[in-house]
Image (spheres, helix red, strand yellow):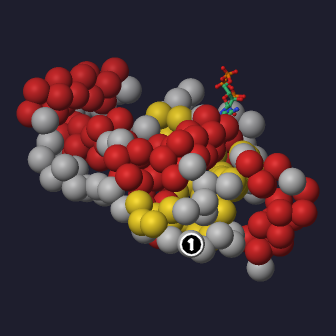
Amino acid sequence: MAYNKVESYDEKITSGLVKNYKECLELLGEDAEREGLLKTPERMAKAMQYLTQGYQLDAREILNGAKFTEAYSEMVIVKDIELYSMCEHHMLPFFGKAHVAYIPNGYITGLSKLARVVDVYARRLQVQERMTHQILDAIQETLQPQGVAVVIEAQHLCMMMRGVSKQNSITTTSAFSGQFQDGTTRSEFMKLIKK
Ligand SMILES: Nc1nc2c(ncn2[C@@H]2O[C@H](COP(=O)(O)OP(=O)(O)OP(=O)(O)O)[C@@H](O)[C@H]2O)c(=O)[nH]1
Ligand SMILES: [Zn+2]
């Protein structure tokens, strides 16, 4: 399967979802047979499989597939990686940016792979805290670098369009390992992602 696109949808899963989404529409007071909604259950079934395709992807395999021997041992930062995920409590989107850094220890990885790892964990039902740690753990375990840092800034639609209805709050989560637990290294990283 391609890393960032569901190319073929599972027929059994799609037909099961279609049946259930049709019932959802009716329970919500809609006429699932009206013209505009006829294909909606199928669109929803495909959209949801796309948005949860991360379950089928392996972050460690992606990183190991582009692991290169290199003597570079300064900080590597990929910042402003946009992410779209769904909170596991309401299945509503949360979206924002991830900043990922590591300090190599003999190995580097392809830069795009860091962004792919973010997608692997974003395209699931998530809480922001767990996603932050999962990204860190995958990088730490495969590249065994001197340290990893992950900061995620996101807005949660479940807090914006329902519930507490706060339009401007941004949630920041972070995880640090190895050298990033040292205050100076962490500050340098934080300064660079704020630039
Ligand atoms: N920690 C954490 N909480 C989240 C995340 N996404 C959504 N939530 C929260 O999950 C909580 C679920 O709380 P509940 O009281 O069970 O659900 P609820 O009655 O719908 O809560 P309200 O959103 O306050 O109306 C809410 O406080 C959400 O804001 C996340 O990524 N991390
Ligand atoms: Zn939520």
Residue drawn at point x = 41 percent, y = 54 percent: 63
51 shown above or below 89: below
Element at badge 1? Answer: loop
Report whether 182 appears left or right of 4. Answer: right
Q: Quadrant of the C terminus?
A: bottom right
Give the percent coordinates (x, y) of residue 140.
58, 46
Can residue 83 be seen in this snapshot? yes
- Front residue of 40/177: it is 177
Give the percent coordinates (x, y) of residue 7.
15, 53
Identify the amino acid type marked 1: Ala
140 shown above or below 168: above
Q: Quadrant of residue 26?
A: top left
Give the percent coordinates (x, y) of residue 6.
22, 50
86 shown above or below 15: below
Residue drawn at point x = 77 percent, y = 54 percent: 179
Q: Residue furthest right?
A: 183
Q: Residue furthest left?
A: 11
Residue drawn at point x = 36 percent, y = 42 percent: 58
Instruction: State ligand 1's quadrant.
Output: top right
Is the CB atom of the residue marked by disc 1 within 8 angstroms of ligand 1's nearest atom?
Answer: no
Total labels: the figure holds: 1
Report whether 9 appears left or right of 98. Answer: left
Can residue 85 be seen in this snapshot? no
Q: Quadrant of residue 190?
A: bottom right
Report whether 64 appears left or right of 152. Answer: left
- On the image, numbered disc 1 is attached to which residue? 71
Residue drawn at point x = 41 percent, y = 45 percent: 60
Give the percent coordinates (x, y) of residue 64.
38, 52
Mark 1 nearby-residue class (10 Å; few <14, some 14–19, many ≥20): few
- Front residue of 129/23: it is 129
